[in-house]
Image (tube, helix red, strand yellow):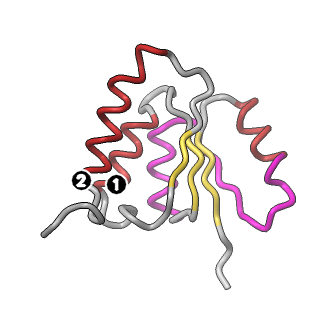
Amino acid sequence: MASRKILLVDDSETVLQMEQMILAKSSYELILARDGEEGVAKALATQPDLILMDVVMPKMNGFEAMKQLRENAQTRSAFPSLWSPAKPKRRAWKPAIKTVAAITSSSPSTNSS
């Protein structure tokens, strides 16, 4: 049986270390990425079962990373994703909600073709 994988995406080494400590005794293989770009690349390469992703990161934020993963046929519906914003800012939530709504409404499970 193939190993189950969790992709941890965060630019904070402290957060990545805490997540690793919490999940250390699990049977999951942990894959680490330190920004959205690296997260997308590793998700495409490893096909994780779950992604724990920060929102505010350099190079590519979590919303853009998720949008790219949802648009790619290889990763579109392969796994659920959870987002863990470490430092949410009020002004970031309005565009964030619009982005999530756009991603969700373009989901294959909600489109009627």
Element assignment for label 2 = loop
Residue 70's disc number: 1
Q: Quadrant of residue 29?
A: bottom right
- The image quarter containing residue 111 is bottom left
Image quadrant in which the N terminus is located: bottom right
Q: Secondary structure at mark 1?
A: helix
Q: Outermost residue, left direction?
A: 113
Give the residue pinned by disc 2: 106
Q: Residues within 10 Å of mark 2 (few under 14, many from 20)?
A: some
**Dot 1 amino acid type:** Arg
Percent of width and height locating residue 75: 40, 62
The residue under the point 60% across, 53% down is 7
Q: Is residue 7 above or below residue 63?
A: below
The answer to whether the residues at label 2 and label 1 have Cβ atoms under 8 Å apart is yes
Q: Position of residue 102 (x, y in %)?
A: 26, 42
Q: Which residues are magenta?
A: 22-46
Q: Look at the image and say whether residue 34 sits in the magenta stretch.
A: yes
Distance CA(mark 2)–CA(mark 1): 9 Å
